[in-house]
């Protein structure tokens, strides 16, 4: 089992560019999440999904979009990248209620 | 805004000592409580979770939960240099989405 796979691992974007961060899980988990982590800070929830076709905003959704067309995939789209979006992005999934998250290895994004 | 507060650290202990990590949360409706360990440059990994008041032991780790005081703690006995990491406390209100709210983390250094 690969668990949660994120690509790319690193990316440098110029201001105003767009990109998609990919996240795939092979555990048949319904619940998936996107968090960002800034230095010295905890993880902040961007978007989450409780199943295919269902997504909702988290704490810091501005500047991002998501889709969930399949159980396995939960891509995060950045439109018009800004320096404030420089961060490490983690995708996570969860099986049943009360279970902990399984995290992907993260994407380190720099916007210059 | 639901908050999770952790002692800011950094916390430094000698090898073999007990490391004590503390966490308080503001949402009285919180149902699930998690401790994650995050090594530098890596993704968080789940080490302990609790749902009920009391103590839970797993090897050298003991988690304690007091819902009345809205307090969670993690004790690491016989600390090892390999325990050096940032420890993240996270809580969830449950309710289906199971969104986790994370604290900023406490950085622990175990000195040989």
Image (spheres, rainbow, N blue to C red):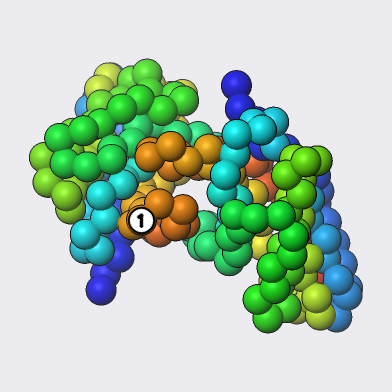
Q: Is residue B17 above or below residue A65?
A: below
Residue A10 lies, in percent from the top left, at: 35, 49
Q: Is residue B33 above or below residue A61?
A: below
Q: Is residue B54 above or below residue A11?
A: below
Residue B6 visible in this rendered orientation of the protein: no
Residue A80: quarter of image:
top left
Residue B16: quarter of image:
bottom right
Name the residue rendered at 87%, 67% in the picture: B13
Residue A86 visible in this rendered orientation of the protein: yes
Residue A34: quarter of image:
top left
Q: Is residue A101 above or below residue A3?
A: above
Name the residue rendered at 22%, 54% in the picture: A24
Report the label total: 1
Q: Which quadrant holds the N terminus of chain A?
A: bottom left
In this rendering, would A65 be left or right of A83?
left
Residue B22 lies, in percent from the top left, at: 79, 50
Q: Assign a secondary structure to mark 1.
A: loop
The residue under label 1 is: A96
Name the residue rendered at 11%, 40% in the picture: A69
Of all chains, the one bearing label 1 is: A
Residue A84 lies, in percent from the top left, at: 46, 24
Name the residue rendered at 78%, 41% in the picture: B68
């Amino acid at each position: 089992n690969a668990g949660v796979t994120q690509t790319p691992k690193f990316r440098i974007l110029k201001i105003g560019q767009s990109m998609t961060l990919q996240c795939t899980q092979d555990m048949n988990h319904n619940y998936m999440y996107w968090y960002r982590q800034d230095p010295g800070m905890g993880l902040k929830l961007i978007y989450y999904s409780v199943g295919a076709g269902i997504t909702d905003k988290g704490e810091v959704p501005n500047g991002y979009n998501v889709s969930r067309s399949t159980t396995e995939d939960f891509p995060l789209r950045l439109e018009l990248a800004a320096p404030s979006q420089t961060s490490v992005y983690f995708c996570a999934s969860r099986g049943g209620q009360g279970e902990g998250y399984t995290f992907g290895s993260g994407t380190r994004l720099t916007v210059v | 805004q639901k908050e999770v507060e952790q002692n800011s650290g950094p916390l430094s202990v000698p090898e073999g000592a007990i490391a004590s990590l503390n966490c308080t949360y503001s949402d009285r409706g919180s149902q699930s409580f998690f401790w994650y360990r995050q090594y530098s440059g890596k993704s968080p990994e789940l080490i302990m979770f609790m749902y009920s008041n009391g103590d839970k032991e797993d090897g050298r780790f003991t988690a304690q939960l007091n819902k009345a005081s809205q307090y969670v703690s993690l004790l690491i006995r016989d600390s090892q240099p390999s325990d050096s990491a940032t420890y993240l406390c996270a809580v969830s209100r449950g309710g289906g989405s199971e969104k986790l709210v994370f604290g900023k983390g406490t950085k622990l250094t175990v000195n040989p």
